[in-house]
Amino acid sequence: MGIIPSIQNLRESDIQPIADAFARLGWRKPASLYQGYLAEQEDGERVVLVASVEHIFAGYVTICWESPYPFFWQAGIPEIVDFNVLPKFRRQGIGSCLLDEAESLIATRAAVAGIGVGMTADYGAAQILYVKRGYIPDGRGLIRDGQAIPHGTPILMDDHLVLYFTKKLVPTPEINLDHGHAKEVTPSLGSGQATSTTRRGQQA
């Protein structure tokens, strides 16, 4: 049975606990990274969804409304970026809950979500999760720094080598409070704000 996390938009008070949690793991994710994310969220460029379990930070994911990946940017596909769940909270459904919330937000503004994943074994769990959720490769092969790798090119296998995926989304309904029924949101009307969720995720 999965854990039911609370999911909210990133707040100033979240920044240091998040940075401290990753520092304890030896991961380089300084507070300045999340201060930048918060500024972008306030400017409407990014949404950062933070999951907590009993008020303890568990993981987060961000949405870039204008992807730095050229194909997504040209096609108007928002990109799910920097998806992390702390090791002790993995395989408990928290990652799936974060992706559920991210996809629901994207569906208020676009018909397709995009995501990229590294090619080393370190990303194996994420590769499997994305395929299970219905993401398919975008057909442009391996990408480094936004550029497709031509056939026969020697490459360095590191975190910058990425395969991009897309997923078609079902439009997210919005409650019409005046009439008490749901209506579909047109792609340009999304607010980019998350609320607490009690949805149970699949095992991630």
Image (cartoon, grey):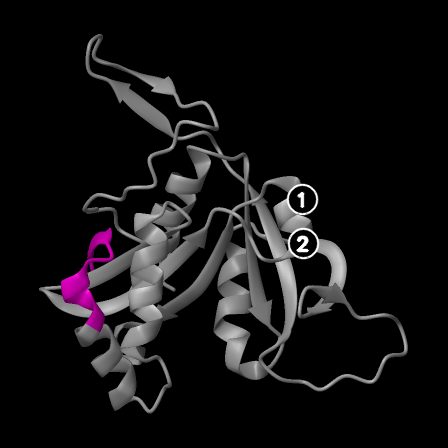
Q: In what element is the residue under mark 2?
A: helix
Which residue was labeled with disc 1? 74
* Residue 7 locus on image (x, y percent): 22, 53
The alpha-carbon separation of the residues under discs 2 and 1 comes to: 6 Å
Q: Residue at x 53, y 66 (%)?
A: 128
Query: Nearest the camera: 175 or 36?
Result: 36
Q: Residues within 10 Å of mark 2 (few under 14, many from 20)?
A: few
Question: Disc 2 marks which amino acid?
Answer: Pro
Tag 1: amino acid:
Gln
Q: Any magenta on residue 135?
A: no
The percent position of residue 161, horizontal first and vertical second, equals 65, 75
Q: Quadrant of residue 35?
A: bottom left
Looking at the image, the residue that sits furthest to the top is 179
Q: Are marks 2 and 1 in contact (CB under 8 Å)?
A: yes
Residue 3: image x %, image y %?
21, 61
Q: Which residues are magenta?
A: 1-15
From the top left corner, tell me how far across and down residue 74 is, in percent. 67, 44
